[in-house]
Amino acid sequence: MKYDKWTHIWYRFFWWLFRICFFFYHPSKMIGREHIPEGPCMLCGNHSGFADPIWVFLLLNGDYPPWSMGRKSLFTKPVLRKLLPYFGSFPVDRDNADLAAVKKSLSVLKNGEKLLIFPEGTRVKKGKKSEPKSGAVLLAQRAGVPIVPIYISPGRRPFSRVRVIAGEAYTPAYTSRRPDSAELERHTQELMSRIYGLGRGK
């Protein structure tokens, strides 16, 4: 499940385009690039705006984008349907158990690539609370890859400074190879605590 050369070309083109545009619209501070492993990992961030995936792309500064899940309805729009694959996005049905998306995610990780997921599932405004899903920690556990928490400044306004912070990669300790829902929930809450903790610590 490797990218082709056209994905690389278009991704780098848009990377520079967004970098230049955001330089003026949202001055940014990227922290913690050294914490992102060379090999496969799960990238997990808080989610407060539509541009959150782009901020993660700018943080990584790689030749190819990490893979990511995109809401199924986005792929019904002609322009996005053609554009999203260049950013490594594939559709997921959030309202049902999407086994195809799960298999694709595991395949990505087991093939040595990175997967970006926002555990909150939907955009959460600054000061609001969410109910994060345990799918991210479960996928990481099944694939045997570390998790990298990423914090992105919420409540962004035009010309405001944005911080994008990657924390140290870690691997949750499970009591068995098939953790139950309570253990997955505990590790999901720990993940979100690590993510938002990055914002308080910098």
Image: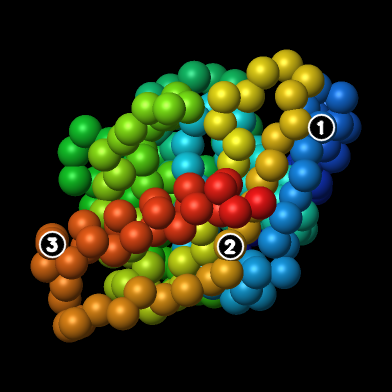
In percent of width and height, residue 30 lies at: 75, 50
Q: How is the image coloured?
A: rainbow
Q: Residue at x 31, y 35 (%)?
A: 130
Q: Which of the pair 2/145 is nearer the observer?
A: 145
Q: Which of the pair 104/126 is nearer the observer?
A: 126
Q: Which of the pair 173/7 is nearer the observer?
A: 173
User: What is the CA distance from the residue labelled 2 to the residue labelled 1?
Assistant: 21 Å
Q: Are marks 1 and 3 in contact (CB under 8 Å)?
A: no
Amino acid type of the residue tagged 3 in the rendering? Ala
Quadrant for residue 110, please give it.
bottom left
Residue under label 1, please give it.
Answer: 27
User: What is the CA distance from the residue labelled 3 to the residue labelled 2?
Assistant: 25 Å
Q: Residue at x 56, y 31 (%)?
A: 154
Residue under label 2, please give it.
Answer: 167
Neighbour tally class for label 2: few under 14, some 14-19, many 20 plus, Cα within 10 Å: many
Considering only order in the chain, which callout, 3 or 1, is on the residue closer to the N terminus? 1
Q: Is residue 174 above or below residue 89?
A: below
Quadrant for residue 28, please give it.
top right
In percent of width and height, residue 27 lies at: 81, 32
Q: Residue at x 34, y 60 (%)?
A: 190
- Tally the numbered discs: 3
In percent of width and height, residue 115 lies at: 50, 58
Residue under label 3, please give it.
Answer: 182
* Tag 2 secondary structure: loop
Amino acid type of the residue tagged 1 in the rendering? Pro
* Tag 1 secondary structure: loop
Considering only order in the chain, which callout, 2 or 3, is on the residue closer to the N terminus? 2
Q: Are marks 3 and 2 in contact (CB under 8 Å)?
A: no
In percent of width and height, residue 48 lies at: 49, 30
* Tag 3 secondary structure: helix
Q: Residue at x 40, y 39 (%)?
A: 91
Q: Are marks 2 and 1 in contact (CB under 8 Å)?
A: no
